[in-house]
């Protein structure tokens, strides 16, 4: 395929935007080649600047769970825009979406809206620290909670339990307050609690990891984390930016029947506009300004356009009794199809899936944490990615990303995708 216009646009973008993109993964660095510039999207499909059509498995990294340019969301945004786009003062719609979110998600009484998942997780940690009057947090290697300083941490070397910065610009002082644990390794978590008695404010986790491919929590892992946190007076933060309003109405809390103390949202909750949120029961949320001492604010928080999009999205999901079942069925169908063709083609692979999150790892061994996720054959993935792109199937340009299935996908789209996967993995 020819990507003439995309290539030209990328050259121009590189002149004035670092790396030509406003978020790094879009630059195709992990897979090589030139990123495709999108002109428009509708339903399950993307259309690029060179006139190619793609079946989209990124879906803006999650938000477009009902497909692109979903009519009720688009219409709500257009109508709102005509009445002014930002006031910096409260609006009724903020209460409506808050009440709806609180009714859908278990274990929360109040919710505060922000403008991104990063902001939600950053604020949740500050709230947890203020509430517990402790400073350290535990996060898991391979989990992503946005790009705020406390989360850009790699495991320290040797026997040290504290982390080190994994980006220049993050101070050693910040890094020492973030402890790194291994996903799905409860003994490792216990050891961290043991070594840092009464010091851990919060443990934050993606209840289903989605930023190292899709990695489900092992049996009882989340329940055991719940008990350890309760025993130690530590708040359990579920980062449901990816899983919230995707795995179930009530997200991973509902699916696994585990109660978190603070829940973070992003992606689906904004229906494709910039929205994040964090929520908890009253005693914790009342600790937030202006009621309590923990400061948090935002000029565009609760923005009318963003709230209109989010409200229509949540309302649609709430009123469609079969939506999550349909998503599960479509994704299971895709999983089965891919499994069949890769097995026939004798490719080394592992497929992980929870609900409508799915990832294909080019390694025959189980993938259950960051270390095992790194074992995938990246050369194979690169070729797989580009060969599919050529054939009109757009998966995420990194082996560490989950594919997001949308309800706009038809079974014909899924069959087409499975056939193309068969074609690109046949070994000569
Ligand atoms: C995407 C993501 C974030 C960050 O959200 P942004 O809106 O990109 O800032 C945080 N946590 C998880 C689990 C995510 O997938």
Image (spheres, rainbow, N blue to C red):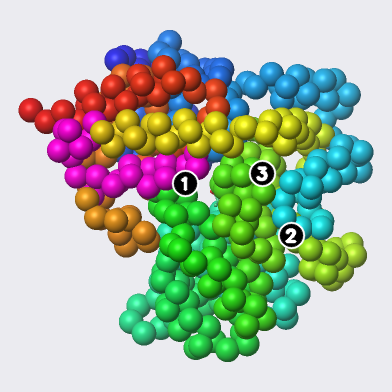
Ligand 1 lies under 8 Å from the Cβ of mark 3:
no
**Vertical position of residue 198 compared to residue 220: above or below:** below
Decide if residue 173 is on the left or right side of residue 130. Answer: left
Task: Give the numbered dot on residue 249.
Answer: 3
Compare marks 1 and 3 and give the one earlier in the sequence.
Answer: 3
The residue at the point 42 percent across, 36 percent down is 332
Q: Secondary structure at mark 3?
A: loop
Q: Which residue is mark 1?
A: 354
Q: Which residue is mark 2?
A: 107
Examine the structure image and report whether residue 301 is included in the region drawn in magenta: no
On the image, the x and y values in percent for residue 391 come to 31, 19
Decide if residue 332 is on the left or right side of residue 427. Answer: right
Ligand 1 lies under 8 Å from the Cβ of mark 1:
no
Q: How many marks?
A: 3
**Vertical position of residue 217 compared to residue 68: above or below:** below
On the image, the x and y values in percent for residue 169 come to 51, 63
Ligand 1 lies under 8 Å from the Cβ of mark 2:
no
Compare marks 1 and 2 and give the one earlier in the sequence.
Answer: 2
The residue at the point 58 percent across, 89 percent down is 197
């Amino acid at each position: 395929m020819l990507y003439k216009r995309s290539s030209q646009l990328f050259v121009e973008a590189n002149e004035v935007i670092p790396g030509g993109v406003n978020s790094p993964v879009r630059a195709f660095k992990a897979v090589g080649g030139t990123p495709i510039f999108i002109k428009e999207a509708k339903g399950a499909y993307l259309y690029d600047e060179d006139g190619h059509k793609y079946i989209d498995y990124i879906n803006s990294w999650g938000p477009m769970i009902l497909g692109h340019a979903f009519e009720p969301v688009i219409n709500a945004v257009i109508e709102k825009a005509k009445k002014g786009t930002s006031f910096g003062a409260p609006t009724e719609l903020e209460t409506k979406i808050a009440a709806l979110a609180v009714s859908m998600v278990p274990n929360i009484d109040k919710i505060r809206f922000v403008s991104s998942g990063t902001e939600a997780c950053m604020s949740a940690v500050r709230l947890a620290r203020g509430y517990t009057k402790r400073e350290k947090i535990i996060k898991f290697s391979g989990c992503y909670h946005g790009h705020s300083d406390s989360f850009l941490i790699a495991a320290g070397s040797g026997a040290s339990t504290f982390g080190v910065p994994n980006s220049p610009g993050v101070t050693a002082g910040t890094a020492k307050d973030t402890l790194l644990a291994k996903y799905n390794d409860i003994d490792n978590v216990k050891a961290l609690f043991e070594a840092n008695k009464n010091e851990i404010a919060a443990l934050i986790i993606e209840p289903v990891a989605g930023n190292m491919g899709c990695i489900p929590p092992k049996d009882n892992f989340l329940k055991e984390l719940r008990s350890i946190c309760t025993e130690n007076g530590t708040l359990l933060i579920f980062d449901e930016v990816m899983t919230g309003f995707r795995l179930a109405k009530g997200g991973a809390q509902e699916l696994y029947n585990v109660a978190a103390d603070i829940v973070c949202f992003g992606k689906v909750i904004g229906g494709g506009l910039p929205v994040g949120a964090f929520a908890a029961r009253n005693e914790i949320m009342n600790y937030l300004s202006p009621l309590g001492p923990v400061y948090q604010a935002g000029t565009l928080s609760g923005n009318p356009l963003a709230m209109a999009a989010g409200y229509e999205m949540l309302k649609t999901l709430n009123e469609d009794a079969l939506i999550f079942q349909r998503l599960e069925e479509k994704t299971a169908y895709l999983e089965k199809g891919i499994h069949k063709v890769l097995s026939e083609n004798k490719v080394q692979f592992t497929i992980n899936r929870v609900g409508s999150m799915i990832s294909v790892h080019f390694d025959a061994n189980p993938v259950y944490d960051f270390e095992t996720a790194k074992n995938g054959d990246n050369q194979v993935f690169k070729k797989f990615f580009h060969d599919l792109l050529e054939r009109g199937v757009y998966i995420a340009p990194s082996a560490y990303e989950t594919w997001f299935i949308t309800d706009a996908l038809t079974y014909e789209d899924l069959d087409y995708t499975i056939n193309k996967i068969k074609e690109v993995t046949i070994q000569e």
